[in-house]
């Protein structure tokens, strides 16, 4: 049954997909978004597997974890979002490549704490790094964002300063402001000059996914519906962005609007985030200008 679950996740994994045990990343790069059509085609299979997986979760939720089961994988995905909020950029996008070991325990009335040993890969360069992390999912009636601490051997010492500065100067000096839609498109294609802004939008969306995550969720970015550069009088590039998040447990596609800034020295700063009303399939996203 665990094999069936691994196969399911390989089908559904998105742009910087959920951590995988031994899966090859080639398909993920060829088809980088979790499109709603895929979720619809596998809906009946998802429901069948989740019933079985729920029973396994109840057994594996405390103590030493099976790294291929959801409790460890969901916690690892939260670490991924956390790392991207700290280290992500147009030229650095992090994903959990593998969970090596994990442990979970109840912490009095505080919640449940996970301790993980993981490998983290930069999606752009394919360079990997080892990290240890602690994730506390707070307990209570009102959902609160998980608390994360992560220690990496080398937080991916890839020097992207020159690339970031060149991108920043180009769009700081442009007379026309950037505007793009559907990254990637329905065929999984992104124009090369738009890839940095796809990465940047995923980094910004990581703030949402980190804030919204719980033990019962598994978030990926399905698509950047649109991103628009806004005029600004300071040293930051400013963007209005509409992203589609794929919550893989419920199979929901959730729309969020983001207002964020970016510059090489300061990184991504999210100014506003707003969940948009649910729309019917095929309905065009609004222009977020």
Image (cartoon, rainbow, N blue to C red):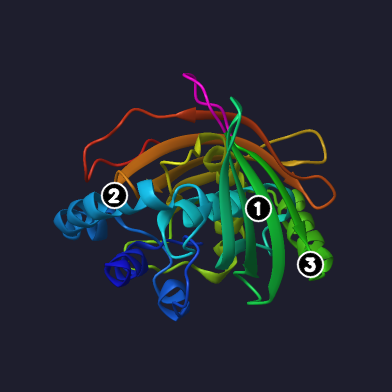
What span is colored magenta in the figure? 138-145
Distance of label 1 from label 2 (alpha carbons)? 32 Å
In three-dimensional space, the C-alpha distance between marks 1 and 3, rounded to whole angstroms, equals 15 Å
Label 2: how many residues lie within 10 Å, few (<14), some (14-19) or many (20+)? few
Residue 252 colored in magenta in the image: no
Q: To which residue does mark 3 refer?
A: 160
Q: Which residue is mark 1?
A: 84
**Residue drawn at the location 29% of the way across and 47% of the way down:** 251
Neighbor class of circle 3 (other Cα within 10 Å; few <14, some 14-19, many 20+) is: few
Task: Find numbered disc 2 in the image and state the secondary structure of the residue it sits on.
Answer: helix
| Residue 158 position within the rendered picture, expressed as x and y whole percent measured from the top left | 79, 71
The quarter of the image holding the N terminus is bottom left
Q: Do we see residue 179 in this rendering?
A: no
- Mark number displayed over residue 55: 2
User: Image quadrant of residue 194?
Assistant: bottom right
Residue at image coords 79%, 56%: 169
How many numbered discs sit on the rendered protein? 3
- Between circles 1 and 2, the one closer to the viewer is 2
Magenta stretch contains residue 140: yes
Q: Residue 139: x percent and y percent? A: 53, 27
SS label for mark 3: loop
As rendered, which of 256 and 189 lies closer to the eye?
Answer: 256
């Amino acid at each position: 049954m665990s094999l069936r679950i691994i196969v399911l996740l390989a089908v559904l994994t998105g742009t910087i997909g959920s951590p995988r045990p031994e899966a090859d990343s080639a398909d993920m790069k060829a088809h980088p978004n979790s499109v709603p059509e895929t979720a619809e085609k596998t809906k009946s299979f998802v429901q069948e597997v989740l019933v079985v997986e729920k029973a396994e979760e109840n057994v594996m939720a405390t103590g030493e974890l099976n790294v291929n089961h959801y409790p460890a994988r969901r916690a690892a995905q939260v670490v991924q979002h956390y790392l991207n909020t700290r280290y992500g950029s147009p030229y650095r996008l992090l994903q959990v490549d593998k969970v090596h070991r994990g442990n979970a325990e109840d912490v009095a009335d505080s919640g449940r704490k996970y301790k993980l040993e993981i490998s983290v890969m930069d999606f752009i360069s394919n360079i990997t790094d080892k990290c240890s992390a602690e994730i506390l999912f707070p307990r209570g009636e009102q959902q609160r964002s998980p608390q994360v601490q992560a220690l990496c051997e080398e937080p991916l010492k890839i020097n992207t300063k020159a690339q970031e500065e060149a991108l920043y100067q180009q769009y700081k000096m442009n007379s026309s402001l950037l505007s793009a839609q559907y990254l990637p498109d329905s065929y999984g294609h992104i124009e090369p000059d738009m890839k940095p802004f796809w990465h940047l939008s995923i980094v910004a969306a990581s703030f949402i996914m980190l804030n919204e995550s719980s033990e019962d969720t598994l978030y990926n970015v399905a698509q950047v519906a649109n991103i628009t550069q806004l005029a600004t009088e300071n040293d930051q590039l400013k963007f209005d962005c509409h992203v589609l998040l794929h919550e893989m447990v419920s199979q929901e596609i959730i729309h969020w609007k983001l207002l964020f800034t970016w510059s090489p020295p300061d990184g991504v700063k999210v100014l506003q985030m707003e969940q948009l009303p649910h729309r019917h399939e095929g309905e065009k996203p609004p222009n977020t200008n």
